[in-house]
């Protein structure tokens, strides 16, 4: 009688994707004329801007651009972006906060090239609250979490 022993070893392949920001998402310099209704400004993933209701664009913003690398060639990657916080650069608490909404990613999903790299472009919508509170002249920032699923 012969006994065969088969052993299968699964070695995990560790692939640590790298995400480098080429340019940040910015809404530029804007003015909120009134906050008696929801107004918003949109920066598309392609970089076009539109303002609605009582927001005026003084200086144009730009879409975000990232380079994904260190992945296998021709790998499909799904991307998720979550808004974490929105803050101001002022110590004055009397300013109203903007809402970051409708984050859009192009392309989605992405597919890496023959070198395991791909570019992604991100846009979003920035909304006012519409509650008659005042937006002060200050810098507003938001933090995002980008998750790559592959």
Image (cartoon, rainbow, N blue to C red):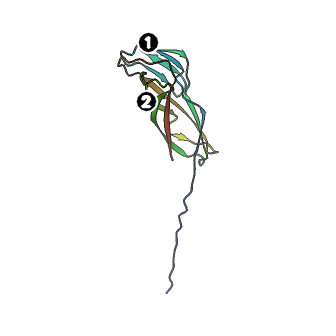
Mark 1 burial class by Cα count in 10 Å: few <14, some 14-19, many 20+: few
> Nearest the camera: 135 or 16?
135
Mark 2 burial class by Cα count in 10 Å: few <14, some 14-19, many 20+: some
Q: Which residue is mark 2?
A: 102
**Picture coordinates of residue 132 (x, y %)?**
36, 16
> Nearest the camera: 124 or 58?
58
| Residue ranking furthest to the top | 33
**Picture coordinates of residue 81 (x, y %)?**
47, 37
| Residue ranking furthest to the front | 91
How many numbered badges does the structure rendering display? 2
Q: Secondary structure at mark 1?
A: loop
- Disc sitting over residue 33 in the figure: 1
Earlier in the chain: of badge 1 and badge 2, it is 1
Q: State how far apart marks 1 and 2 are (Cα).
A: 23 Å
Identify the residue at image location x=44%, y=19%.
135
CB under 8 Å between callouts 1 and 2? Answer: no
22 shown above or below 48: below
> Nearest the camera: 149 or 136?
136
30 shown above or below 66: above
- Disc sitting over residue 80 in the figure: none
Identify the residue at image location x=57%, y=49%.
16
**Picture coordinates of residue 104 (x, y %)?**
47, 31
Q: Secondary structure at mark 2?
A: strand
> Nearest the camera: 30 or 52?
30
Identify the residue at image location x=55%, y=46%.
75
**Picture coordinates of residue 62 (x, y %)?**
56, 24
């Amino acid at each position: 009688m012969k006994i065969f022993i088969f052993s299968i070893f699964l070695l995990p392949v560790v692939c640590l994707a790298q995400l480098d920001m080429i340019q940040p998402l910015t809404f530029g310099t804007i003015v909120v004329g009134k906050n008696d209704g929801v107004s918003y400004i949109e920066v598309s993933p392609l970089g076009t801007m539109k303002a609605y209701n009582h927001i005026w664009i003084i200086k144009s913003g730009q879409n975000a651009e990232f380079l994904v690398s260190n992945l296998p060639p021709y790998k499909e990657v799904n991307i998720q972006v979550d808004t974490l916080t929105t803050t101001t650069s002022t110590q004055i608490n009397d300013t109203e906060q903007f809402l970051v909404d409708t984050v859009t990613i192009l392309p989605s999903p992405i597919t890496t090239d023959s070198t395991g790299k791909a570019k992604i472009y991100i846009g979003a919508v920035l909304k006012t609250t519409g509650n008659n509170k005042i937006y002060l002249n200050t810098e507003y920032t938001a933090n995002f979490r980008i998750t790559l699923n592959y």
